[in-house]
């Protein structure tokens, strides 16, 4: 063989055989690669659908809970407006009696005859009722629902494992997360967002109206999806890597 092909002929033949084997190996891996990519895309879409359904269910529970608290605030305001001791205290400008009333009514104010007692949270939904005496308005009672972490915990009972609920106003987080962090989502359309450096999939409500510009947003971490992306990138690097040729012998 050496005499027929010479010292370089055998080397070229070995290189050809190696490339031929590598080519058939790549052909064998091609269906596997196609299946892998297809499965990866399918798994990602399936995970997105599952996450979106969970976020939507959690938001429905949260909005219902928020609405219920607004109704409770309105009921409390009507009750206080109808109490005779409140009306008498306003008539007599009895500030001490009014303060005694609101002492047991958190996030409530009574206003009338130049007197205002009680305090309201800076960020809250409010329900106000006029205090009447013989058909004449003599004051106003206002009951607020604070927009804070406590509220989000109470109305976020429908959240799944790892999910969280945040309050957003004018595209900024105001409760449930890093205050002031930017968070922009189209209402009703889930999307990937970055909140304070953390990647999540989020779904937002439309503006709740009170307070103006307030939205509830349900978030779920995208750690699992990030792992899938990493595995996909690694697989692509392996499949795209050049096949090394045979080492030349001296």
Image (cartoon, rainbow, N blue to C red):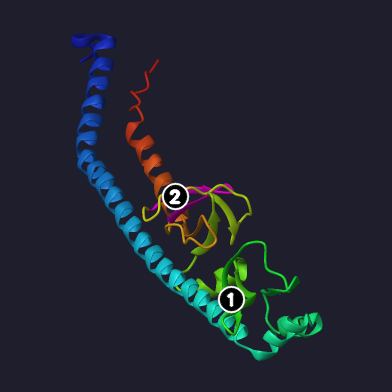
In the image, residue 21 above or below residue 164: above
Q: Which residue is pictured at 79% across the width and 83% down the height?
A: 94
Along the viewing direction, whichever of 129 and 174 lies nearer the viewer: 129
Which residue is labeled 1 in the image? 130
- The answer to whether 170 appears left or right of 227 in the picture is right
- The answer to whether 224 appears left or right of 30 in the picture is right
Between the residue at mark 2 and the residue at mark 1, the CA separation in whole angstroms equals 38 Å
Along the viewing direction, whichever of 101 and 136 lies nearer the viewer: 136
Q: Which residue is pictured at 75% across the width and 70% down the height?
A: 114
- The answer to whether 175 appears left or right of 38 in the picture is right
Along the viewing direction, whichever of 133 and 172 lies nearer the viewer: 133
**Residue 140's disc number:** none
Q: Which residue is pictured at 56% across the width and 77% down the height?
A: 73
Q: Earlier in the sequence, mark 2 or mark 1?
A: 1
- Indicate the secondary structure of the residue bearing disc 1: strand
Which quarter of the picture shows residue 21?
top left
Magenta span includes 191: yes
Which quarter of the picture shows residue 118?
bottom right
Q: Which residue is pictured at 59% across the width and 85% down the height?
A: 134
Q: Which image quarter holds the C terminus?
A: top left
Along the viewing direction, whichever of 85 and 50 lies nearer the viewer: 85
Q: What are the residue bounds of the magenta stretch?
A: 190-203
Which residue is labeled 2 in the image? 185
Instruction: Name the spot of residue 13 as percent of width and height, x first.
Output: 22, 18
Instruction: Single out the residue that lies furthest toward the right.
Output: 96
Binning the other alpha carbons within 10 Å of mark 1 as few (below 14), some (14 to 19) or many (20 upward) gives: many
Instruction: Name the spot of residue 33 as percent of width and height, x first.
Output: 26, 42
Magenta span includes 54: no
Instruction: Name the spot of residue 41 as percent of width and height, x first.
Output: 29, 48
Instruction: Single out the residue that lies furthest toward the bottom.
Output: 84
Instruction: Name the spot of residue 234 as percent of width and height, x first.
Output: 40, 41
Most frequent secondary structure within the magenta stretch: strand
């Amino acid at each position: 063989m050496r005499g027929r092909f010479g010292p370089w002929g055998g080397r070229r033949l070995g290189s050809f055989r190696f490339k031929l084997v590598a080519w058939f190996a790549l052909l064998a891996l091609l269906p596997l690669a196609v299946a892998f990519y297809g499965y990866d895309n399918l798994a990602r879409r399936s995970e997105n659908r599952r996450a979106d359904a969970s976020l939507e269910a959690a938001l429905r529970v949260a909005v219902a809970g928020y609405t219920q608290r607004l109704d409770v605030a309105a009921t409390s305001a009507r009750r206080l407006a109808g109490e005779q001791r409140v009306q008498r205290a306003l008539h007599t400008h009895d500030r001490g009696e009014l303060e005694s009333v609101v002492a047991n009514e958190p996030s409530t104010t009574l206003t009338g005859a130049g007197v205002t007692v009680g305090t309201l949270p800076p960020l809250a939904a409010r329900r106000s009722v006029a205090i009447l005496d013989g058909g004449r308005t003599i004051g106003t009672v206002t009951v607020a629902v604070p927009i804070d972490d406590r509220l989000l915990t109470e109305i976020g009972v429908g959240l799944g494992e790892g999910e969280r609920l945040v309050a957003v106003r004018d595209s900024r987080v105001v409760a449930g997360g890093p205050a002031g962090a930017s968070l922009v989502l189209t209402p009703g359309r889930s999307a990937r967002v970055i909140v304070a450096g953390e990647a999540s999939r989020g779904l937002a409500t439309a503006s709740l109206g009170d307070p103006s510009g307030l939205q509830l947003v349900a978030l779920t971490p995208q750690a699992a999806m990030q792992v899938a992306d990493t595995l996909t990138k690694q697989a692509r690097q392996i499949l795209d890597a050049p096949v090394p040729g045979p080492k030349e012998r001296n």
